[in-house]
Image (cartoon, grey):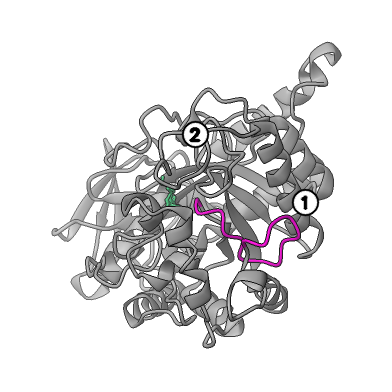
């Protein structure tokens, strides 16, 4: 059974839950199931972490890391004036990279709203000299350029007094030792409702931050049900690093392939039966960090995308724009180079699922429409033995050139010969 079948079965199983329980169990709508299919076929998205923290160029956790009070942090919005912000160029960059969707921070842990929210003046329209919503023109450009738009939305909030009791972070903010957590959740739902009723089609909400207050009553299903009632197709994901909760439509991993835990972020998460996505940075920082020069190579990033696809997962690759609204060259160059590779090899990524051979030291496989794509990422020799395919292999060829590849059945499977002149240092498909 492929993951796709498992996903269908899981959704079908949900419909078999006895009526008595059905009221509680989340049943994705047909529109949502269709959106999940689209999501899986999209395979590659652009993550954007952008906020007033970019003024300092020290990443998105600067308020917490530098133990800033709200008063000290409030000096940043008056300096945030992204006059060079060009949403058409941002969306065009994502398209050139071969990305099919964008996930942008509407609100990060500093609670600062990047749209003209009516709930609080702590927002880009009322608290910065720029005085304009940046999400609305981005949503319009996405519609024009056929890119879907997700909002990253932080549950964690370092500036809202009603985020009380406090969690593990944001403890130097100077908030009073009192507050009404349910009033905070009502505030959060009201802001989400603005995003889901005033910005056209929203492809989904990418939650983050409940790990700050484990065990708190986050009323997740109430919020998820509100989202699905406003936009049934909207895909809900929550970066809690646990197995998926009821009401979620996709499962994300951070700085690890699904099921991995090299960074310690994904400690308790198990791969569930939902569409998968893994997210990663180009350097190490999510938000703009002027000193972080640890840029991954284009080859490394292409191979991350390929390995994710080999595990039936999407790849969400991040940029942290500057406070003036521009994107640093190191990001633009790499995104463009990935796009060039995908122009030739995209058929082995878009619309595929994990292949019949699970990831191996030499590479991964993907599959679509009766074809298996063998991604040779690291194999020095001309001959490569692979396990037997589930159906007889009619022929083999290089995706990029169409040139035939000799394939010979052997007892253990097949012997592929990879012509030296057909090799692609990023990935020979
Ligand atoms: O704390 C956030 C961090 O700032 C960033 O948004 C990442 C992106 O996945 N998520 C959290 C860290 O796990």
| CA distance for labels 1 and 2 | 24 Å
SS for tag 1?
Answer: helix
Task: Decide if residue 390 is in sight here.
Answer: yes
Left or right relative to 94: residue 36: right
Q: Is residue 143 above or below residue 208?
A: below
Residue drawn where x is 52% and y is 75% of the image: 78
Q: Which residue is mark 1?
A: 193
Are the two marked residues, 1 and 2, in contact with CB atoms closer than 8 angstroms?
no
Q: In the image, is residue 120 part of the stretch drawn in magenta?
A: yes
Residue 95 position, x and y percent, is 55, 76
From which residue to which does the magenta span run? 109-122
Q: In the image, is residue 271 part of the stretch drawn in magenta?
A: no
Magenta segment, principal secondary structure? loop
Nearer to us in this view, 12 or 176: 176
Which is closer to the viewer, label 1 or label 2? Answer: 2
Nearer to us in this view, 111 or 137: 111
Q: Is residue 146 above or below residue 311?
A: below
């Amino acid at each position: 059974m492929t993951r796709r079948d498992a996903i269908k079965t899981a959704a079908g199983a949900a419909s078999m839950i006895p009526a008595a329980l059905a009221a509680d169990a989340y049943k994705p709508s047909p529109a949502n199931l269709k959106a999940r299919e689209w999501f899986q076929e999209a395979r590659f998205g652009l993550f954007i972490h952008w906020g007033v923290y970019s003024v300092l160029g020290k990443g998105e956790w600067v308020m917490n890391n530098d133990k800033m009070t709200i008063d000290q942090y409030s000096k940043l919005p008056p300096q945030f004036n992204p006059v060079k912000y060009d949403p058409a160029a941002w969306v065009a960059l994502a398209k050139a990279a071969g990305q099919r969707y964008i996930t942008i921070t509407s609100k990060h842990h500093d609670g600062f709203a990047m749209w003209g929210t009516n709930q609080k003046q702590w927002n880009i329209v009322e608290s910065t000299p720029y005085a304009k919503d940046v999400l609305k023109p981005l949503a319009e450009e996405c519609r024009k350029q056929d890119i879907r738009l997700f909002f990253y939305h932080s549950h964690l909030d370092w500036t809202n007094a009603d985020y009380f009791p406090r969690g593990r972070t944001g403890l130097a903010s100077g908030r009073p030792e009192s507050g009404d957590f349910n009033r905070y959740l009502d505030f959060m739902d009201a802001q989400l409702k603005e995003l889901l009723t005033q910005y056209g089609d929203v492809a989904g909400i990418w939650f983050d931050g409940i790990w700050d207050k484990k065990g708190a009553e986050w009323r997740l299903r109430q919020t998820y049900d509100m989202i699905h009632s406003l936009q049934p197709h909207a895909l809900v994901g929550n970066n809690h690093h646990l197995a998926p909760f009821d009401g979620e439509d996709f499962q994300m991993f951070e700085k690890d392939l699904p099921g991995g835990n090299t960074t310690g972020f994904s400690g308790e998460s198990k791969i569930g039966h939902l569409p998968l996505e893994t997210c990663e940075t180009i350097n190490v920082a999510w938000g703009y960090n002027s000193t972080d020069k640890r840029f991954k190579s284009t080859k490394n990033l292409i191979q991350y995308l390929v390995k994710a696809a080999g595990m039936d997962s999407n790849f969400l690759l991040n940029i942290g724009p500057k406070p003036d609204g521009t994107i640093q060259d190191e990001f633009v160059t790499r995104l463009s180079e990935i796009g060039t590779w995908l122009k030739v090899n995209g058929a082995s990524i878009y619309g595929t699922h994990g292949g019949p051979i699970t990831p191996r030291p030499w590479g991964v496989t993907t599959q679509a429409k009766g074809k298996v794509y063998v991604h040779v990422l690291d194999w020095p020799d001309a001959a490569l033995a692979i396990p037997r395919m589930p159906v007889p292999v009619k022929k083999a060829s290089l995706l990029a050139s169409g040139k035939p590849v000799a394939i010979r059945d052997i007892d253990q499977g097949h012997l592929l010969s990879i012509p030296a002149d057909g090799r692609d240092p990023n990935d020979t498909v």
